[in-house]
Image: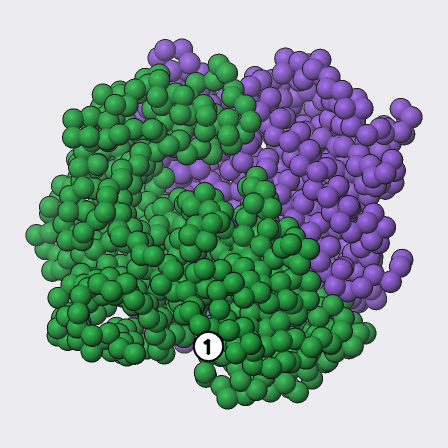
Amino acid sequence: MSALDPVTLAVLRGRLEQIADEMDATLFRSAFNPIIAEAHDASHGLYHAETGETLVQGKSGLPVFVGAMAFAVKAVIDRAAAQGGPKPGDVWIFNDPYDGGTHLSDFKLVRPFFHDGTLFCWLASVGHWHDVGGAVPGNYNPAATECFQEGMLIPPVKLFDAGEYRPDIVQILQANSRLPGSLYGDLNGQINALELGQKRLALLLDEYGAQTVSDALEELKARAATLMRDLIASLPDGRYKAEDFLDNDGIDDVPLKIALAIEVRGDRMHLDFTGTSKACAGPVNIARSTAIASCYVALKHVFQDVPANAGVLVPIDFTIPEDCLLSVKAPKPVGGYTETILRVIDTVFVALAAAAPERVNGCAYGTINALSLAGHRKDGRRWVMFSFFGGGHGGHPEGDGLNHGNAPISTATIPPLEILEAAYPVRFTQWALRPDSGGAGESRGGCGAVYEIELLEEKADAFLFGERGRYSPPGVVGGGPAASNHFAYQDGDTWREPPMASKMLGMKLSRGRRVRLETPGGGGYGDPARRSPDAVARDVRLGYLSPEAARRDYRCAIDDRGEIDLSATEALRAEVGQ
Amino acid sequence: MSIKRAGRTVVGVDVGGTFTDLFFLNEADGSCTVAKVPSTRGDQSIGIRDGIGQRVDDLSAISTIVHGTTVGTNALLERKGARTGVITTEGFRDVLEMRRRDRPKTWGLWGTFDPIVPRDLRLEVPERVLADGTVLIPVDTDAVIAAARTLLERGAESVCLFFINAYANPANEQAALDALKSVWPNQHISVASDILPEIREFERGSTASLNAYLQPPVGSYLQKLEAGLRDGGFGGEVLIVQSNGGVMSVDTARRLPVRTALSGPAAGVIAGAYIAQNAGYPNVITCDMGGTSFDVSLVAEGQSALAAQTEIDFGMVVRTPMIEITTIGAGGGSIAHVDRGGILQVGPESAGSDPGPVCYGLGNDRPTVTDANTVLGRIDADSPIGGKLQKLDLEAAKEAIRRHVAEPLGIEVMAAAEAIVRVANARMAGAIRLVSVERGHDPKSFVAMPFGGGGALHTGALIKEVGLSRALVPRYPGVTSALGCVIADMRHDRVETLNAMLDDLDVAALDQRIVGIAADGEGLLDRAGVGFEGRDCRVELDMLYLGQTHTVAVPLPLKVGKDGSGVTRDIIQSAFESAYRAAFGRLLDGIPIRVMNLRMASIGLRPKFDLSILAPAPGLTKAAALKGTRQVWADGGWHEAAVYDRLALPVGAEVDGPAILEQADTTVFVEPDLKGRVDEFGNLIIERKEAAT
């Protein structure tokens, strides 16, 4: 490491981040499918020439990719080595989730960056494509037992060979998708993003010299490691345990355990998932790379000032047992990976709460609730409405949890209901906050939501892929759990619930019938008995909380207008104190 | 100097957080003057009358007062609008609180959100319109009246009507409005489909409810302002600057106060575009550096870019066309620190103007960008600008930089001060790259124009950092926004959702709609009682390929008359294709095209004035403008810099860096490898030494 002056380091850090951010922005603007364009389910960055470690990653992409992409690049590095090494102008494309993380919908493009004939680093782009084949449109198949039912699986192959485009590859991809046009648009957006990264990085190297930039990248990694060590050292030594459960895998109705022990010793941290359930039949498995990426997301939510580079993981060790839920290999299905990584993140929050109560928050709603309604219009056109829904965030040291937020792994916004109603034959009959859904606490968990949808066409098929139907989002530091996820649908005049609580395929709806999704709130933070009766009364007055829940969870006597009975409240609270 | 009661005077007024700036143009003799007075918090109109009084004895000499106001902006940021109620569709009262399911920050889950209309003031009534405009459930007007009474009992001063899908058919909202008017005791009613008949319920509802929230405070402010002026003998027109850079009448502003959300900054960009265009540079990036933020805006070929919406604060979305301004947290008060990883950071945390930089001596002990500039000799500690302080505490600034930056980084204090400025410059350069390079513009064809108090210290460095051709420091950087008020055109925007496939679009109906909106716009221009030099009507469509979500703005080459606009399907198709090709390179053949929104702007062109009246008087000499020299630190060492009285420099004067040019409200620093030149309008053009030959 040469003596890089502090100004150059600070300036280069900003310039490098801007390159990755600009790659993100390019794809968001030109992408064809809303999952990238609106939900920002994509990511870009620069990766280490030999190891594939993340050097710099864009700030606006999907948080979970920040950890996962290093594995994807490493997979390409190994493939390239077997083929005699990368050449300028090569671009690999693949979606293998077992090597590269996440699920089949995420296509990665990886391109070597050469400077003066030497491999300087790798550039990569990942984006969630609309449809990659498999048994169901959109690729969330709750009934998958092998990845082959989830979509096509492409190993790292060359899309460009030394700059020469290979249209046959694109033809194969398009032939395997229900939406070949959308696929083509997104693929071109990703190619453009890599092209832009190439151009910007070349300019930067011309301006500062390869050695200086390379020194800066090394230094940034070292600083990130120092920063992470420093943060770990500020936690008390100890072993902090948490466990949580998935409802089921959609195939066998048995709960799946995620067990975590975080061991803090000095400036190192060990995350040990021993005791976690075995790999399951259904699609809630994840690969080891995905598991590590989700731990990274959790840690970055807690320690927000750590940068998005590999240095952060230097002082952290992982134990993830072979063939458990969190380390599966092909062809175990992984399509529902979001549910599992959300649960991993929750266990990290709960375990860390014992070590650093002042840094954590109650768990968020913990499920993306992928709901699909599909059918044919009178003129025969097929329609598919596929959306993810929101819920509450956990209470935290600075206040109550956010009502109706997005999932911690994503920055996606929800489409306006007017856009959905204009595009599909449905009408929403309710789009509201869900009372009594936030976990009790000194800081209350945020409210989840109620969405009720009525079908306006003759008939439709529906499926749901959710979680937290039986195990609700936990609170921390004495806070209570949130309400669990609840789904119901009308079969004729009868309201029914999915036998497996949060997952169901093959629901039939007819005109005028409805589905109703009530999502979890966030977990509470701190002892609810410490919440001021005035704050509880305000919650009742505003309808976030029922008088019954105020009495039960907060020991406050409040009528339905939000008027508080102080002496009755004192008596109730005294009862608990005894 | 004061203006006699003779002829017509136009006054531009920009009220900022600290100062109220005024620009006076006497249209009779073509003379102009400026004034600067402290802003009066609580009632800005007092400061305005003070400022006008400094230059005008008799208010009847004034024909027009054009006002960029922050009353609306401040009410939003400080959440000091009226107690507002919302009456909405059964099942949807939480739309405003649920937002678009987002969170304040990507990393960290500690967000909170308090909607400006609390839940018990959002009431539901039975009614429902479907996406195609069908009325499924007619509105229950008795329920509307009952809801209005409940809101009044709960203390609501203003009310917003906001029904689902009313953009597609406003019948239920209008019926509810009729019922509401029978019981609502004041004018403070906002109807969402009137204000923004555009698809997207949260954005429409948020904009409309924020409008209702602002109606009482902005309305009463404007009334006070007008009444005070009339009492003083003023008989002309008051115009208010909108966020889109155009002006509107006071009546329109009372009805649509949400359009003033970014009134102040918009006027500055308008002025920047005009000044640069006159100086021969139609491509300009304006840079406004204040105490806490750095705002940049790009003007290409004389046209500023408009953004469809902005988020004033988390969950506080205003969707009306507004001049696109990119803001980063880097200003004079931005605090420098070394983070836990040992990296120097500047901002976004700021000491603001109170307590302000360490050198102000008002209690802050963490070094800021202004402290670094003071230590480097670029700001004169013995006679600071702005007139608030007599002297800056140089030693305290040095000590803060030593402790918080130099020691943690292991470097000398002077190197640390320069490092702070360079890191701040790098952040500002990033913002400029964001609006230029990242939007496909070649920086070499742009000039940077600083305005506001602090920008001119940094602009030279910025042009080198980003590769811009040159910087242009206007003659009066401190009153740029007030000058912009004087030249801004009147403009009324209207957006309506069409949401139809191009192949199915009813072109005849669209033509009628265009003609109707144009006529409404003309009517608004007529009623403003302002003389225009000309009028313009712009028609634009938001379009996209089926399946996409981001639209492309497609200007239509139409000439709208009373009988028709001449619009055809072919015109729309080819306009879309050229707009799409320009944005993304190539067309996507075979994919159907959708027309989402119709956007129209009715523009009344207000007279411009000849900027050469700002030029330095004849007979000045460079020698007489030289005030002395000062030691300035740059590029790792001390330099002897010439110090000039900027306003005393003659046209054509050339100043080699390193040099400092001082004027009442701004200090310009010309770096050692740059040189400055005074153009015929009195602007200072800063270029590289080698490029300038």
Residue at 85% in and 50% down:
A211
Question: Viewed as shown, does residue B468 lie left or right of B665?
Answer: right
Mark 1 crowd level (few <14, some 14–19, many ≥20, 10 Å Cα): some
Residue at 71% in and 58% down:
A11
The colour one sees for chain B in the rendered image is green
> Is residue A70 in view?
no
Q: Quadrant of residue A101?
A: top right
Residue at 35% in and 17% down:
B570
Task: Give the residue pinned by disc 1.
Answer: B664
Q: Quadrant of residue A30?
A: top right
User: Mark 1: which secondary structure?
Assistant: loop
Q: Quadrant of residue B43?
A: bottom left
- Name the foreground residue: A129 vs A562: A129
Q: From the image, which quarter does the N terminus of chain A lie in?
A: bottom right
- Name the foreground residue: A368 vs B608: B608
Please provide percent x and percent y for residue A291: 73, 42
- Name the foreground residue: B637 vs A379: B637
Please provide percent x and percent y for residue B247: 28, 54
Look at the picture and state if B322 lies above or below A155.
below
- Read off the chain for label 1: B
Question: Viewed as shown, does residue A343 lie left or right of A265?
Answer: left
Count all numbered tags in the image, as a single digit.
1
Please provide percent x and percent y for residue A404: 46, 49
Question: Viewed as shown, does residue A466 lie left or right of A23?
Answer: left
Residue at 40% in and 31% down:
B554
The colour one sees for chain A in the rendered image is purple
Please provide percent x and percent y for residue B352: 51, 73
Q: Amino acid at mark 1?
A: Ala
Look at the picture and state if A371 lies above or below A541.
above
Extreme residue toward the front, this view: B619
Instruction: Give the colour scheme of this rendering.
Output: by chain
